[in-house]
């Protein structure tokens, strides 16, 4: 509607300007030829006056009107002049037969000289212009519709992608939550089906407790993701020393690595004093996820190396492992929620999704590749910042959560094969 209204206004103004210019040209011809008629003796006027520069113009006819109102054509071929009260110096537009004419009049002694010219050509030009504008309006409206449709499709694509991912996430979350609930329900029903011994009940309760811990981990991770996605970070930025947070996290995971017979090392010598704009607890959670995953996939007798270094004006965190690595075809999907390369890890499938949320909210960059140890390299880089470091950066505010993970990870259910 806006396009149609705007085009109508522009077209209307254009039509008025074109018609006004043509009428001005006709009026100028009438005045000029009327002046010429006054200088030519009566009876010597040609058949239809025209000047040299108007070879293609329609003819101008001249009449003489007496004081009694009788008219007489002074040129041959002139149509009959309609009865009208002619006023010298006044321009009139009348219809002669079925043809519109424009007239001018001037007094010449006791008579009035009237000249007129057909303006049918102006009407024809106006009609042609209206038809052209109507066709152009249709083409323009169709083009605008196609453009708006293309923009709408392009603009709605991310929204549709979010809606699709949200639907997939809801389905995956329902499946992940349903599995431990089904196990708990089945274990309880079997335990209640017939009398059992005390050790049998303890085994059943142990399995129920394990599924309960799995449920708690899933719920905790979902709540953490929701909090990260909705947290307002408009206030003053909190800064962290990545090497200090990573060192603290590696120290906490030494027990996990020892329980899985994995060598876990840290090297922060290449990043002295580097800080980034990120909350320490977020960086701690990111490092914890990466180290935990690396220790799971490194396998018994494997190695995990954590390194923090500087690369230009960026701070780089690298976590390498000696596991099987990540195939190139899988690297674009490792950050999807509930995606797992295999079921042997026993995780919730939310760890890397949490890590990705942290990296995106802290304006970091991922680089997933191959590690010198033979497995996967998970690398994150941030633009280095300057300013005071948060007091909890060295210890990591997620230490309590990290200890909970140690207790869960070193249990019999978390011990990897091999």
Image (cartoon, helix red, strand yellow):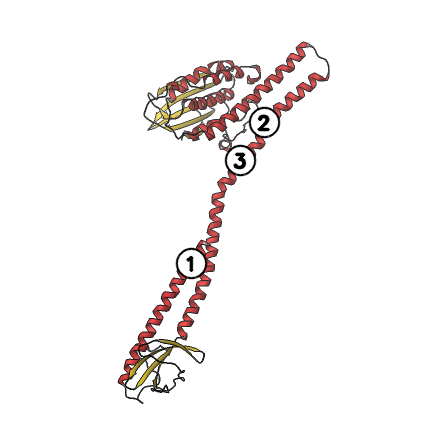
Q: Nearer the viewer, residue 112 or 394?
A: 112
Q: Whole-percent x and y of residue 379?
A: 42, 27
Residue 262 x, y percent position in the rendering: 48, 16
SS at mark 2? helix
Q: Within 10 angstroms of label 2, few (less than 14), some, or many (20 or more) residues?
A: some
Q: Is residue 385 above or below residue 6?
A: above
Residue 47 placed where, x, y %? 35, 85
Q: Quadrant of the C terminus?
A: top right
Residue 304, horizontal then vertical, whole percent: 45, 19
Extreme residue toward the right, this view: 194
> Pointer 1: what residue?
7
Q: Is residue 325 visible?
A: no
> Circle 1: is it few (<14), some (14-19), or many (20+) Cα within 10 Å?
some
Q: Earlier in the sequence, mark 3 or mark 2?
A: 3
Cβ–Cβ below 8 Å for labels 3 and 2? no
- Alpha carbons under labels 3 and 2: distance apart: 16 Å
Q: Under tag 3, what secondary structure? A: helix
Task: State which tag comes first along the sequence, 1 or 2.
Answer: 1
* Residue farthest along the front direction in this orientation: 68
The residue under label 3 is 165
User: For this rendering, which residue is in front, 54 or 345?
Assistant: 54
Residue nearest the viewer, comparing 43 with 217? 43
Please state which of the two labelled residues, at mark 1 or mark 3, is closer to the viewer.
1
- For residue 405, above or below residue 39: above
Earlier in the chain: of badge 1 and badge 3, it is 1
| Camera-side residue of 128 and 375 | 128
The alpha-carbon separation of the residues under discs 1 and 2 comes to 57 Å
For marks 1 and 3, give the CA distance.
42 Å
- The residue under label 2 is 176
Residue at horizontal 42 percent and vertical 72 percent from the top: 123
For the residue carrying disc 3, how many other residues have a C-alpha within 10 Å: few (<14), some (14-19), or many (20+)?
some
């Amino acid at each position: 509607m806006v396009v149609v209204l705007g085009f109508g206004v522009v077209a209307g103004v254009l039509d008025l300007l074109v018609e006004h210019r043509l009428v001005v040209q006709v009026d100028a011809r009438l005045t000029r030829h009327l002046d010429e008629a006054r200088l030519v003796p009566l009876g010597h006027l040609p058949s239809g006056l025209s000047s040299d520069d108007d070879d293609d113009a329609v003819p101008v006819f001249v009449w003489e009107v007496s004081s009694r109102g009788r008219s007489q054509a002074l040129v041959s071929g002139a149509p009959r002049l309609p009865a009208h009260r002619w006023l010298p110096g006044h321009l009139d537009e009348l219809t002669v037969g079925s043809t519109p004419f424009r007239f001018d009049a001037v007094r010449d002694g006791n008579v009035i000289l009237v000249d007129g010219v057909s303006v049918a050509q102006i009407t024809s030009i106006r009609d042609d212009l209206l038809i052209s504008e109507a066709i152009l309006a249709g083409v323009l409206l169709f083009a605008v519709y196609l453009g708006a449709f293309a923009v709408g499709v392009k603009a709605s694509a991310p929204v549709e992608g979010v809606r699709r991912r949200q639907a997939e996430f809801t389905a995956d979350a329902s499946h992940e939550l349903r599995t431990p609930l089904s196990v708990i329900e089945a274990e309880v029903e079997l335990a209640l089906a017939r009398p059992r011994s005390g050790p049998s009940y303890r085994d059943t309760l142990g399995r129920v407790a394990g599924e309960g811990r799995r449920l708690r981990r899933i719920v905790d991770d979902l709540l953490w993701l929701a909090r990260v996605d909705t947290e307002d970070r408009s206030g003053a930025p909190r800064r962290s020393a990545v090497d200090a947070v990573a060192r603290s996290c590696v120290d906490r995971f030494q027990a996990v690595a020892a329980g899985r017979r994995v060598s876990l090392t840290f090297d922060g010598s290449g990043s002295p004093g580097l800080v980034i704009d990120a909350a320490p607890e977020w960086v701690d959670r990111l490092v914890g996820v990466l180290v935990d995953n690396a220790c799971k996939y490194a396998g018994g007798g494997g190695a995990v190396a954590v390194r923090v270094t500087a690369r230009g004006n960026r701070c780089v965190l690298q976590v390498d492992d000696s596991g099987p690595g990540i195939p190139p075809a899988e690297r674009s999907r490792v950050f999807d929620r509930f995606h797992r390369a295999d079921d042997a890890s026993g995780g919730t499938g939310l760890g890397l999704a949490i890590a990705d949320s942290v990296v995106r909210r802290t304006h970091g960059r991922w680089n997933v590749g191959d590690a010198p140890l033979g497995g996967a390299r998970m690398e994150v880089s941030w633009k280095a910042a300057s300013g005071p470091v948060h007091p909890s950066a060295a210890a990591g505010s997620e230490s309590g959560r990290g200890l909970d993970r140690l207790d869960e990870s070193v249990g019999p259910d978390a011990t990897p094969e091999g």
